Image: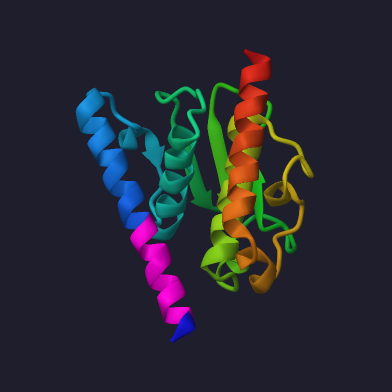
């Protein structure tokens, strides 16, 4: 019962956040993100990618909204490599690959953690250990869930600070 109320509370927060973003978009007449530039076929990967881009807007992080964001599965990644940011240090494109074999064993929190980690590498050249989500290993299910909101806040504040420093 306690877990159910926790999950319903999280769902209400997500719904309210989405509602506020939609209202802000309509009010300011500026798209929060250009979904046409999000080239992600898999529904789950797409959901986490759009969440990441939405967080960037919530934290007022400046990024190129016209740049194509490409996230896809790639069976050619080595075993033990859950994801790779091929666009890191190449600011002209964003190309993230996710290992489908790792993906199928991850829960939602781990999947979200992995996508956020790789997009932070790729879009902002974030280094390992710059925030908890930037640890090089995807955590186990319990650790991924523990303090997730705090870790997301640290990640996006770190990104915002880096963008501000680099002008």
In the rendered view, does 114 fall on the left or right side of 56?
right
In the rendered view, does 5 fall on the left or right side of 137?
left
Q: Which residue is pictured at 58% across the width and 32% down the height?
A: 123
Quadrant of res 75: bottom right
The residue range painted magenta reads 3-13
**Image spot of residue 81 (x, y percent):** 72, 57
Quadrant of res 149: bottom right
Residue found farthest to the top: 167
**Image spot of residue 142 (x, y percent):** 66, 73
Q: Which residue is pictured at 43% across the width and 33% down the height?
A: 57
Q: Main secondary structure of the magenta part?
A: helix
Work out whether residue 116 or residue 95 is closer to the camera in this orientation and state it: 116
Question: Which colour assignment does the render follow?
Answer: rainbow
Quadrant of res 101: bottom right
* Up/down of 114 relative to 80, above or below: above
* One can see residue 143 in this view: yes
**Image spot of residue 20 (x, y percent):** 30, 42
Work out whether residue 121 or residue 97 is closer to the camera in this orientation and state it: 121
Q: State yes or no: residue 74 in magenta.
A: no
Q: Quadrant of the N terminus?
A: bottom left
* One can see residue 87 in this view: no
Work out whether residue 6 or residue 76 is closer to the camera in this orientation and state it: 6
In the rendered view, does 114 fall on the left or right side of 73?
right
* Up/down of 75 relative to 34, above or below: below
**Image spot of residue 167 (x, y percent):** 62, 12
Q: State yes or no: residue 7 in magenta.
A: yes
Residue found farthest to the bottom: 1
């Amino acid at each position: 019962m306690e877990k159910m109320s926790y999950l319903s509370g999280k769902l209400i927060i997500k719904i309210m956040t989405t509602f506020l973003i939609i209202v802000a978009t309509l009010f300011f007449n500026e798209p929060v993100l250009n979904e046409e530039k999000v080239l992600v076929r898999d529904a789950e990967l797409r959901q986490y990618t759009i969440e990441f881009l939405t967080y960037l807007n919530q934290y007022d992080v400046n990024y190129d909204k016209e740049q194509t964001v490409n996230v896809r599965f790639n069976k050619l990644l080595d075993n033990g490599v859950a994801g790779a940011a091929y666009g890191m240090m190449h600011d002209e494109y964003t190309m993230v690959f996710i290992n489908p074999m790792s993906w199928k064993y991850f829960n939602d929190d781990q999947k979200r953690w992995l996508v956020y980690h790789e997009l932070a590498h790729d879009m902002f050249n974030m280094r390992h250990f710059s925030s908890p989500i930037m640890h090089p290993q995807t955590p186990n299910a319990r650790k991924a869930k523990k303090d997730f909101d705090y870790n997301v806040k640290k990640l996006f504040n770190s990104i915002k600070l880096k963008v501000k420093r680099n002008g």
